[in-house]
Image: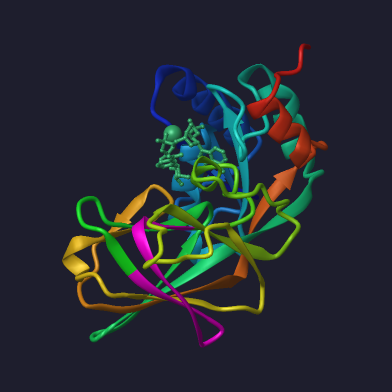
């Protein structure tokens, strides 16, 4: 017997797909489990898969994710609603490969201790009103003082999301790395930042030491916002955990990039 769970965007089109998947799997003896599913279906968009991921960060090593898109093609959603029967056939035969993607680890270090988070897309640190000032250290060594709207630290699979909007590079998810990109830095004779995105390998650590009062900036982790008082340091690195996706057919990352941003394929 297999355990599954389905997360839906909540709209009518997604709802119908969910009902169909649930019926088919239950008919074949599969059981719905919201604690430790082996297979998690996300039906909706990339945002739906982010939600699914955060639901199951406690059991990433035992869970594989699978995305059906009921809107446009997404980066974490391979399947269209009319392909679901074909997909279910494969799911029931258990004939899938597992593809793993790197994650970003964030440790928020404050006076009261540490809070640890994982991001599938990115973390941002932003100040909506005041200029955000932060010291950046790389592997324990001072690198620069940043002044501006904020910073975006993204995973390779998140590089096509927020990171892309702020001029970051697109990184293939087979590269165990994370990227630091600036959001509107102030650069003049007095204030200087590197000005281009930086890509870190998996054994490097990037620390942010905020000089702006904790009340005046906020931290986002994918679609979530974290309110954290008394932040002394934010420590980023590639997480030891990975996210696992079930792959039932090839869908190369660069094809996905092309179809999302350049040109849709006609079929
Ligand atoms: P949302 O406002 O619906 O997301 C914004 C867009 O980003 C949606 O079109 C979403 O796709 C897409 N997206 C999510 N992950 C992606 C990825 N890995 N590659 C390419 N596109 C991706 O909010 P949400 O659905 O809760 O997603 C949260 C994400 O939104 C954050 O992680 C951040 O990356 C992104 N975001 C971007 C900006 C920006 O570009 N200025 C600002 C805020 C947040 P779906 O429609 O399929 O969900
Ligand atoms: Mn969304």
Q: Is residue 6 visible?
A: no
Within the image, what quadrant is residue 212 found in?
A: bottom left
Within the image, what quadrant is residue 134 found in?
A: bottom left
Within the image, what quadrant is residue 79 found in?
A: top right
Q: Which residue corresponds to the image point at 70% horizontal and 65% vertical from the top-left?
A: 176
**In this rendering, is residue 259 above or below 36?**
above
Image quarter for ligand 2: top left
**In this rendering, is residue 19 above or below 151?**
above
Furthest residue toward front: 189
Residue 69, horizontal then vertical, whole percent:
57, 27
Residue 42, horizontal then vertical, whole percent:
53, 38
Q: Nearer the viewer, residue 202 or 1?
A: 202
**In this rendering, is residue 72 above or below 246?**
above
**In this rendering, is residue 107 above or below 65?**
below
Q: Main secondary structure of the magenta part?
A: strand
Q: Nearer the viewer, residue 238 or 47?
A: 238
Residue 1 placement, left or right of 72: right
The answer to if 264 sits in the magenta stretch is: no
Furthest residue toward top: 267
Q: Quadrant of the C terminus?
A: top right
Residue 202 placement, left or right of 16: right
Q: Nearer the viewer, residue 160 or 244?
A: 160
Q: Is residue 181 visible?
A: yes
The answer to if 150 sits in the magenta stretch is: yes
Q: Which residue corresponds to the image point at 75% horizontal and 24% vertical from the top-left?
A: 86
Magenta residues, as a range? Answer: 134-152
């Amino acid at each position: 017997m297999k355990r599954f769970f389905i997360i839906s965007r909540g709209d009518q089109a997604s709802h119908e797909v969910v009902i169909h998947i649930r019926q088919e799997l239950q008919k074949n003896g599969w059981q719905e489990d919201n604690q430790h599913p082996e297979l998690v279906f996300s039906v909706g968009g990339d945002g739906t898969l982010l939600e699914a991921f955060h639901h199951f960060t406690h059991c990433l090593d035992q869970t594989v994710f699978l995305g059906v898109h009921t809107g446009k093609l997404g980066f974490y959603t391979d399947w269209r609603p009319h392909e679901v029967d074909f997909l279910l056939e494969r799911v029931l035969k258990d004939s899938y490969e597992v593809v793993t993607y790197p994650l970003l680890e964030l440790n928020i270090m404050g006076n009261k201790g540490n809070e640890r988070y994982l991001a599938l897309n990115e973390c941002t640190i932003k100040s909506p009103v005041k200029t955000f000032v932060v010291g950046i250290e790389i592997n324990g060594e001072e690198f620069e003082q940043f002044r501006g709207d904020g910073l975006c630290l993204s995973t390779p699979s998140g590089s096509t999301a927020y990171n892309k909007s702020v001029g970051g590079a697109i990184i293939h998810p087979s590269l165990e790395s994370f990227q630091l990109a600036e959001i509107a830095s102030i650069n003049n004779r007095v204030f200087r930042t590197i000005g281009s995105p930086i890509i870190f390998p998996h054994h490097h650590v990037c620390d942010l030491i905020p000089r702006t009062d904790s009340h005046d900036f906020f931290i986002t982790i994918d679609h979530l916002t974290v309110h954290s008082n008394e932040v002394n340091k934010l420590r980023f690195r590639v997480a030891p955990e990975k996210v696992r996706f079930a792959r039932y057919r090839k869908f190369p990352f660069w094809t996905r990039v092309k179809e999302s941003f350049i040109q849709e394929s006609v079929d």
